[in-house]
Structures are given as C-alpha cells and as structure tokens.
Amino acid sequence: MIGTGFMGAAHSQAFRVAPRFFDLPFHPEMTVIVGRDAAKTQAAAEKLGWAEASTDWREVVARDDVDLVDICSPGDSHAEIAIAALQAGKHVLCEKPLANTVEEARAMADAARDAAARGIRSMVGFSYRRVPALTFARELVQAGRIGEVRQARAAYLQDWLVDENGPMTWRLDKKLAGSGSLGDIGAHAVDAVQFITGQSVEQVSGHLRTFVTERPLLASGVGLSGTASDERGTVTVDDAAWFTGQLSGGAVASFEATRYATGRKNGLKIEIFGSRGAIVFDLEKMNELEFYDGADAAGEQGFRRIFVTEPEHPYAAAWWPTGHGLGYEHPFSHQVRDLIFDIAEERAPSPSFDDGLQVQQVLDAVERSSADSARWTTVS
Amino acid sequence: MIGTGFMGAAHSQAFRVAPRFFDLPFHPEMTVIVGRDAAKTQAAAEKLGWAEASTDWREVVARDDVDLVDICSPGDSHAEIAIAALQAGKHVLCEKPLANTVEEARAMADAARDAAARGIRSMVGFSYRRVPALTFARELVQAGRIGEVRQARAAYLQDWLVDENGPMTWRLDKKLAGSGSLGDIGAHAVDAVQFITGQSVEQVSGHLRTFVTERPLLASGVGLSGTASDERGTVTVDDAAWFTGQLSGGAVASFEATRYATGRKNGLKIEIFGSRGAIVFDLEKMNELEFYDGADAAGEQGFRRIFVTEPEHPYAAAWWPTGHGLGYEHPFSHQVRDLIFDIAEERAPSPSFDDGLQVQQVLDAVERSSADSARWTTVS
Amino acid sequence: MIGTGFMGAAHSQAFRVAPRFFDLPFHPEMTVIVGRDAAKTQAAAEKLGWAEASTDWREVVARDDVDLVDICSPGDSHAEIAIAALQAGKHVLCEKPLANTVEEARAMADAARDAAARGIRSMVGFSYRRVPALTFARELVQAGRIGEVRQARAAYLQDWLVDENGPMTWRLDKKLAGSGSLGDIGAHAVDAVQFITGQSVEQVSGHLRTFVTERPLLASGVGLSGTASDERGTVTVDDAAWFTGQLSGGAVASFEATRYATGRKNGLKIEIFGSRGAIVFDLEKMNELEFYDGADAAGEQGFRRIFVTEPEHPYAAAWWPTGHGLGYEHPFSHQVRDLIFDIAEERAPSPSFDDGLQVQQVLDAVERSSADSARWTTVS
Amino acid sequence: MIGTGFMGAAHSQAFRVAPRFFDLPFHPEMTVIVGRDAAKTQAAAEKLGWAEASTDWREVVARDDVDLVDICSPGDSHAEIAIAALQAGKHVLCEKPLANTVEEARAMADAARDAAARGIRSMVGFSYRRVPALTFARELVQAGRIGEVRQARAAYLQDWLVDENGPMTWRLDKKLAGSGSLGDIGAHAVDAVQFITGQSVEQVSGHLRTFVTERPLLASGVGLSGTASDERGTVTVDDAAWFTGQLSGGAVASFEATRYATGRKNGLKIEIFGSRGAIVFDLEKMNELEFYDGADAAGEQGFRRIFVTEPEHPYAAAWWPTGHGLGYEHPFSHQVRDLIFDIAEERAPSPSFDDGLQVQQVLDAVERSSADSARWTTVS
C-alpha cells in the first residue's frame, strides 16, 4: 500500500473487510504500508492494520513477500511507482486518475500490457463502477432494457471550495494534482457513463473555469484541516469543468464537474436516456437506482426507485438482508474481491490501465478544447 | 350556491371552468349565491361570477330557476338546507362532512333516498376522490394490481394551529364545526381509504386530543386573518385524532389527523399495502402516484413515480399535455363534471349522502371510542 | 386572441380566471378569437368563452372594441400580427419564442419600442417567470441570499419524441417552428436562468442534434393525435440542444433541452449555485422551491423544500390556503394580472419584446456555434 | 460473542472496524465465538475473525481471558447468558430486544444493576440510536430546536412476509422470538422515539394482527433460505402491530410495525412534531435528516435535507469526507466505540438494561391492550 491518506484508509478497510464477507480464493495479507514521514507512516500502519511501515517504496516493490502493490499516493507519483512495480512482477491496483498526463498514462498502460503477457494483473481504481446500483445499471443497459442510448447527463457536484478563503491544498496545484475538478471527479463521471453505456467518448467540446484564482497558503498541516497563513498561492487547476461528448454509439453526453455546487456534498448524478427506457442515479443516494421501463403499460410508466440491496443485485447478497444499505467504502471491498478473483483465475481485471488511459485522453481532449475556444476535439 | 368562503370560491371556480374543458350535456348557469351579509354576498357574487346575491337561502331553494343547490356553508347548517332543497325538488351538492352529527346526516341521507325516488340527485363533496391520482389508485386496486389489501396507512397532516396564540376560529367551536381535525380532515382520510380499497371501516379504536385548550378570541374579523382580542375562548374540538380501523375486507387501517404537524401544509398521505403490490400518495404531490408492482421481476421492483397527467389517466385528457400538472381546485371541476353527467343520465352520483352518513358514523365511533378508553367500537 | 390551440386554451383560461382571484383595475372582456378554420374557430369561441369568432386577424386587430391582442399562433406568424397590432395602437401579449428569427424579433422589438412611446404596452409570454416558486427564487437571489452566482444548470427535459415512429408535426418543421427543442423549451430555460440570476448570456458554445431524421407524415388531423400516413417527411429542426453560456456577471451556465429524455414529462430543472447558497427548482414539482442557505449554522445546512403556497409568496395569497398547490395554468393568470396592471398604471411590462429579442439572439448564437464546431460565439 | 447469525456478523464487523477509525482507550481482542454447531461455529470464527470457536457458552463466560460478552443469540437465551456473564464479572452487550418477556428482562436489569455496583458494565444493543442522523436528531430536540414535542409518528415497515407461502422461521415462533413485528422492529421504533424526545411511553392502546396464520415448515436449513416442506406450522406471533402511546412529557405517539408493507424494505420512519419545528427520518435514507426550523423567516420555512456526514455531526468525523455516506453496519461500530469508552472511563453505558426493560414493558403493555379490546393500558 503506497499512501496513508484518505484513499489509503479506504483501501485498507477494503483489504481487511472483503475476506470477511466474500469467499475469496485466498486471504490478502496486509504486509507493509509506505508513506513519506516515518512516524506518521508507522502510526498509520498500526491504525489501518498493516504489519510494517516503510518510507521507501522502491524497496517495498522489490520485496519478495509483496505480491500486490496498491497505489494511493498523489497522481504525480503513479507512473513511476506503477511501472516499477509491474516490472518487478507485482500486480498493481492504482487509484484514479491513472496519471497526471496522457504521456504518463500511456507509459503505464504499455507497462501493464507488457506485464499482462507475463501474467501480471493491473487495475485502475474507478471504484464507483462497483457501487451495486451502477453495476446493476450497466446490466440493465447491456440487456437492452432502455433500448438504444441517446443521451447521457452526468454531473459530479461538490461544494468544498465554495468558501473563497478556504486554503490552497495540493489538489489545487497542477503539478501535484494534474487538474482540478476535471481529473478528480470529472474522471469518475466519464468512466461511469462509458461503463454503463458501453460507449466511449470520441469527441469533446469543453470549457474549464477557475472561479477563485488565489487562496491562502497553509502555514502548517495539510489539506483542509491545516492552518492558513497570510500569504496567498495561485490556484493552477480548474475549479469547474463543462463538456459535451460524442459517444461511439451515436449518443451525446453532457458532463459537468465542480467543487462550487453549494449544497451538493458528493453528488455524482447520472441520467441515461434510451429509446425504450431510462436510468437515473445519484451517489448521495447510492443504494438506489431509478429505472424507467418504457415497456410498462401506458399510464403505468414511471421511474421506479429500486433499492439495490436484494440478493439478485450485484455484490449485495454478501452483505446484509434486503433493505440494509451500504456506505461509501463498500465498493472498495468489491474492487478487492474482484481483483483477487482476477488474479486467482488469471483474468484481465477491469477497468484496465488501458481504460484508465482512455479516460485520461478524454480529460486531455477537454483541456485542449477549452484552450481552443471550446471547439470539437478528438479524443486521442 | 350557499356559502361565500373558501369552499364557495372553490366551487364557483369549478362551475365556471368545468364546461370550458369538458364536453358536458348542458352548461351550468350560475344563478344566485347566498350569504349572511348582504354587502359581502353582493361582492362575492360579482367576484365569483354569480348573476345574483341573496341572504335568504329558503327563498333561493324555492326558486323555479334553480335546479341545483350547492351547500358550502358551515356544517351546522347542512342538514336544514339540504333537506329543504331536496324536498323542493332540487339536486344537491353538499360539502363534506355531510353534517355535524350522525343524526343530522341520517336525516339527510333519508331525504336524499326519498328524493332519488323522484329523480332528484345528491352528492357529498369528497372532492379528493377526483384527484386523478386517487381515482387512478382505485382503478389499480379494483383491477387487482396490488392483490388483497392488508394494511392502509392514512394521515392528514397540517400545521396551521401550531402557534398556541393563534386565534379561536369557528373551526375550533364544536357547535359550529362538529369536531376538529377529525371531521375536517380525518373525514377525507377515511373517505379516501374506503374509496381506494373498496372496503369500509367497521370497528375503530381511537383517541382524540386537544393540545391547546384556550385561544385568543377574535375582536373583529373572521378566520385566521381576524384581529385577536385579549379575551380567550375555550377550544371545544379535538386538535388531533388517531384511530385504527378494521375494514370490511379484513384489512387494518391506521388513521391520523392533526393540525399540529409542524411543517406539513396539506399532507394527506396514503399508503395501501396489498399482497401483490402497494400504492402511495401524498396530496402535497397531487399529480404523482407511487405504485409498487410485485409482478415486476425480482431485483427490478420498486415504487414507480407515475406522473398522473397522461391521456390514459382519469380526467387528465381534458386538461393539458402530458406532464403539465393540475392544482388544488381541479378536482372540484371533475366533481361538477361528474354530477352534471349523473343528472343528465339519471344516475345516482357517488359519493352519495349514504356514503357521507357512513363516514359520519366512523367519526362518531372514533369519538365514542376515545371517550371509552380507546376500546374497539362498532361503526353504526 | 389569435390562435385556438393549446396556448389559446391556456390564455383563455387566464383571462376568464384572473379577475375572479385578483382585484384588477378593470375586467377584461373576451371579445373575439381568431383561427384559420371558420367552423373550428366558432367551436373554440364557444368552448373557451369568447363572444365572437373570426378567421381574419387583420380585421380583428383593426377593430375599435379590441384593446389587447394576444398572439398564440405558431411562431412564423408572430412578427406580422404583432407589428400590425402595435401599429394599430393595440397592446400586445405574444407567446414565446418571440419569433422564428432574430430579424423578425428585432422588427417586433423595434415596433414595440415605437408603440411604447405612444403608451402602447407589449409583453412576451415567458409564463414560467410567474410560477410563484421562480418569482420567489429571483427575489431570494436579488436579496443576496445565495451570494454571488457562480454556476447555473438548466435542463428542460421532455420525452414526447422518444418513439421514432411518432408523426411529423409542425413543431418539427423549421419553416413553421423556427427551431426544435432549442426554441420551444430551451428558450424557457434561457429566460428562467437570466430572470433568476439577473445576468444575461453573452457567449455560447453549443451543439444541436437531430436523432430521428425522418418521421411519418400525417395523413389527416394535426399534432400528435393525427393519423400517420405511409409517407415520411424530413425533420428539419433539432431534437436536442446542449450549450454552455458565459453570463454577464461572471457566472457560467449549462443548458440542455431535449424531447428525448425518456421518462421526463415536463422537467424544467434549474439549479443556481452561489457563493453563499443555492436554489433548485423542478417544474414537475412546481409548487416547491429548494433553497440552501449557507448562513445556516454548520451541521444544520441542507436544502429546504419550501412549499411556495404561503401568503408571503408571490401571487399565492390570491388563491388557496397554505399548502394547496397551483397547476400548470395558473402562471398564465398571473401574466394577465400583471399585464392589466401594467396597462392601467402605464408601466412597461416585463418581459418586454426586447427581452424576447435577446433570448432569440441567444438561440441564434447557439445555432451559429453548433454550425461552427461548437466554438464560443457572441450573442448579438 | 454468542451467536453466529446476522447479528453475529454485524457485531463482529464492529469489533474489527471500530479501532481502525476511532482512537480507543484499548483495542478489543476477538477471543472466542460461540454457536450451537461445532463445525459451523468454527467456520464462522474464521470468516468473522475470532481466534477460537466454542459450543459451550457457560465455559466461555467463565474464561479469564474474556472481559466482555456480546450476546447475539435469539431472545429466549438472553436472560440466562447475560445473568451468568454479569455474575461472572463480565461486561455485557446484549442485542435487543433485551428478552422475550418482562420477567426475564427484569431479572436481567436487576443483575445489571448489581453488577454495576461492582464496576461491571452492560448495554442493550439499540444500535439505531447511533445512526448519526438519529443521534443528531436527539441533540436538536434536547437543544429546544423544535420546541415542546407534541406528536411523534413512528413506523417500521418491512415486507419480507408478504408472500403467504414464505416459510415458517424461528422468528414466527413465539417461544423463540417472544413476539413478531412488535418486538423485532416495533422495539426499535419505541426506543428511537423515546431516545429522540427524551419522553417515555406511559400508556398504550394497541392492536396486534396475524395476517397469515399458517406457513410451510422448513424441511431443512434455516431462515428464509431453507427449503420449505409440505407440512405447515402455526404462526404464533403478530405479523403487524399498531399502537398509540401517551408520553411522559404530554406528547402522543403513534407506532406501527409490520413485515407486510409491500415495497418497504427497511423503512423505519420517524416524524417528531414540536411547537417550534419538526424532525423527519427514514432509515432507508439513513445519512439524511430532515429538519424544519420554525425560527426561519416566514415564507422561507421548509424541511431541510441535512446530509449528516459533516465533521460537526456525531461520529461522522471519524469516517470519510463530507458527503460520503455510511451504511447499515456503521452504527454497530459506534456502539462498540461508546461501550469501550464507557468501560475505560467507568461510566454507565446507555441504553442500559433498565432502558431495555422499559421498552420490554411497553411491548408487554401493547400485548395486554390488544388482548383487552385496545383499552389504554399502563406501562409497568
């Protein structure tokens, strides 16, 4: 495990919990966690349940008793670590976005393909695919239940930057984060739409905007809980992104990603409209899927609120009885479950690094379009 | 038209509007409106569109050019006026509750039955039956779409008495109003459950409570808009009512009616649970009906939000295109439409005065049960 | 009244009803209705309550006993009729969109400005401005309750074209309708965002798409209820429109208008995010406004569902008690009310023909942008 | 840990997870799990993370290396195990309902009080108190934010018995389960209302009903997943319960518990109406609390949907960032957290066995009232 932050905690929970609910072909051992600061990493190891702590990822990815490397560090470190791990013959789970640039992502995807030839597996962590409601949404679409997909609407709405005096964190620094809302949450929206519809974004017209261009630097500490200083730093990423995409199957999708949607806390909202039905999802109500079935009798059609906690639903039977909902962290356990099965059964995991690269290319095309008067730009 | 208040305005609008949207066998003429105060009644006549104003209902119900008498005055006057009108050979539409006591209601039902033998029609104004979503709910239940009804939950929640310094109005005086929440809004809940399920309440166990027993008297004016004086009057009706009913078909229904449900403005909430499905309605979302169809495939079941504005839905085709909702007053137009057809086609209107009497008997049984330690009490 | 269709009915209802609920300086007389077919127009006159019927609008706008001309005919006729009426010294209420082209709209706005100098009033019928929840939304924004507006999201979602075998109606013919979703419903979205935020759209990047390019011609009848023939006609308007707008106050707005949003019946959804709060509206729940107040204590913030039926709310006191909702047609009565006061008090109505022209210019810029690879295009 | 079923799994997860998110005074060791069947218990131990398995609870509660006994077995075994454990000087966490009869519950409460004098702690597992939204609801009520509580409405609606051919499980056998909906889910509703309002139920009028009196016996297996045989057993518990309660502070509460509410999966719905505000909660949306603040300006009042995931909210800061919701199992971790702190800081846990006894007394009074024509019955 590389990384001790928010994602490190979420992934650790998944490794601890997945074997308690799913029957896995083998039980993952939580060997070593890597961080920058020795004392903090040691504390994280104890807290999160890792046997050892280390500050040297190079050493860790070379260890014989490490089979799988899970990368939860900031995006600028992904490529180097992932490629080294793959070359060392370790399976790799890498948080999204795959990398901060298309170039890095392409190198990673190349390395993953090479490694795959040697039986080494890699997966990129678009964990929302494994929210049961979204997995189920894909099943419905693939079964033709909404007919031909014509339009998708996807918005990822958060509001943690609304206060213009909120501090300058690493997520607002292009060097570390690659992009702002676009890569952090817009990437989830792109992946979700592509995953559900089975169509890929081929052309985009996009716009990026930074509403607050300077913010107080942190005198100490990190993230939102640090102490602000009197100095100000320059925000170098987008605060919000809007883009329209032409999909490979002929559909059109609109995307919006923002951290300024006052009142929206973690609102990934997805609507898919097809010729025979529709699907609506909101991550703030992650145990529900709305499904409109055009095959229902006239006068009886309506969006059904399906509580996605039935034994018939993806992953649900492993957890609690009907009606007992899951939380934010459960899809990470599903990710661990699936990855372990993929490794055991020598199967290519999904989403692959190639999938991660493709999302990166979409984001890149949005940036290029935004810089070119929003002109239609090919994803490549 | 007898009465110039809130209901007088609603009924007047219905007579004016119904012929503009429905093709009726004849066009109602708005002849004369009756009130207590000559000047106010004259003003009401002009405002609401009546040709004449009168302060003498006896004279009006005797007029040759009056065919239909619509009674919108307070409950204590219903019996006398309705019986006189029926005896004078006029069709009668009477606002609910039919009367303030079972005795009055029985006399009215008797008079209505007598008059019916002479071709005179009568209807009691449970207008919510003609909210398209509720009419449609009944159709679904009658078609067996939710199977055998086992449980009903009905609550009518308002909050206009929350402020303990709100004034003492006629609705809080048992002599004028008959009862409080029980008769005013609980009656709607009883009628709705019976109408949708087709089962009648046979036994009740109930409880009445008055939370605020004294309120400022009105120095001048009427209703909630009057000026409060320093003196206080005694509230002689219930503020809230709770009761459980055994239905004729074996179902059990719970009822709750209150004017102290802070934040609920006009929340008539009805849930009907059957062996194969369920129905949910909330008057605050009157254009929607939720329908749970147990015949849907496992894993695809969920409450469907049906927007009851399709041409297939009751009354809806006469109004606007799909998706364009109706408001509070439209069911009164449906009531006028149906009554006029009933008169033209010589059919007994529904709900009849007998239906109104039966609801009155339910309310009476609740009062008796409440006075008798909530014991099960037969509706009779 | 020019036009006997859907809008003709809605406007007629407004003229009949407004004086029954509002105290107006004068009572409108419903003199004459104009249509193409003599028999049908006569029937409409009787049904809708007009004293006379005519098939010659030129004669009607010249009549001395006509003071106000209400134009509800298709968009291609607006300019000619409106200009003639204004020149004849009649006040004009014209349905939206103001015209089918910017040129026509500009001529109309010029005529309206000329007429205004002579005391003649004109208004364009963006009736949704007078949905109480939207009028109230504007009040909240103008009072600074959501701070500086940063983002708006507006989508108008309908689904009546989902069936690819649905007939070719006049609304799909560019000559008659001007545009498709863009002008029919996208115009409402643009007007609503501009009205609420007080900012105007200055630049757009947009995309138009026609999903179904050929549809069965109508053998007889009109509209959706006609009989389809074997021949097919070419759809010459957009089925859906997506555009992003830069607003005059620095905000960014995303727009989407479509008739292919399966399951959405009349879903005009508007979200406005500001630096201190947010507002959310959905026309399918037209009596509600969601308001997020960033001034609420931390931990107590949340979207409030305000039931916009209180005496404090715009227009609401004239209708029913708290909690008794309005329907689709009521805003037309508010429009009549305001127009009559404007005429009586010699005030310029809002929205003016200039406002209508500006919306037309936005739509035109979207079309130009769509034809130019979605490039940013100036509204002019 | 006594019990290997659903609750055993939920509690095990809590012991494993709580120390990973909360800073606890000591780290619980998962020593031994007890079940009836040796092989199954061994499998459960491995799956759920217990060091040892045992089939002899008497031996286990006597072990020196056991400090805390967690009882998750069926209700008929609670009293014997809990009393033995307390007498052996072990802290006890006991699932709700505390026992199957008031007598057993009283003996347990007596034993708990005796043990408390010796520093031994006991807690009953009304885990929903520790759903952040409900803990927060109590805080709001205690702070006077909704004024004086007048009415509560609580319903616990499930539907897993809707199918009349569903099998006869131990939960339908009065000997094992004590009661049906009443004790299983009605107990949660009672505890929640009392917890939030701070008032206790003193009098009840109630009704119990069994809709389906015979069900197929299980040929093999257990629970809902067993195989049904041709023979039928008699259901000896209530299928649904309705009761009204008079609360110690003058409020009236209505309760409803059922497993026949078709379409409701785990719907614990609670509404609390006070003189200055209201609170609404639905367990199917467990991360949300609706709060109506009567102190908001007129015209701006409405139910606020508070997403209870902010750092200010109970327990929330230990988990994920704002907007990332919790699932069904998290309150069990909160329960473990609080119990461990109570033990460490030598504090009486809440809810105590006395609280559990009181709830048992309410349930018992409901049964007595139901048997006595729904008459008001004192809780004692």
Image: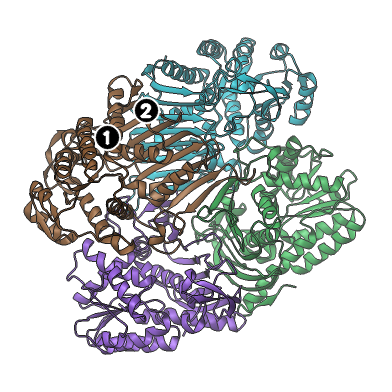
Chain colours: A purple, B cyan, C green, D brown
Q: Chain of mark 2?
A: D
Q: Eyeballing the image, is C92 above or below B226?
A: below
Residue D1 % position (x, y)? 17, 52
Under circle 2, the secondary element is strand
Q: Which residue, as the protein is rendered here, is positioned at the far front?
A: D118
Q: Image quadrant for the C terminus of chain C?
A: bottom right
Asked whether, in this view, residue C10 is left or right of residue D114, the answer is right
Instruction: Inspect this view and state whether residue D195 appears.
Output: yes
Residue B81 % position (x, y)? 64, 13
Name the quadrant containing residue B86.
top right
> How many C-alpha atoms fall within 10 Å of the one at disc 2: few (<14), some, or many (≥20)?
many
Between the residue at mark 2 and the residue at mark 1, the CA separation in whole angstroms equals 13 Å
Residue corresponding to mark 2: D202
Residue A62, numbered label: none
Q: Which comes sooner in the sequence, label 2 or label 1?
A: 2
- Tell me which amino acid carries mark 2: Glu
- Tell me which amino acid carries mark 1: Leu
Residue corresponding to mark 1: D357
Towards the viewer: B81 or B153: B153
Q: Chain of mark 1?
A: D
Q: Eyeballing the image, is B125 above or below A7?
A: above
Name the quadrant containing residue A24.
bottom left
Towards the viewer: B154 or A275: B154
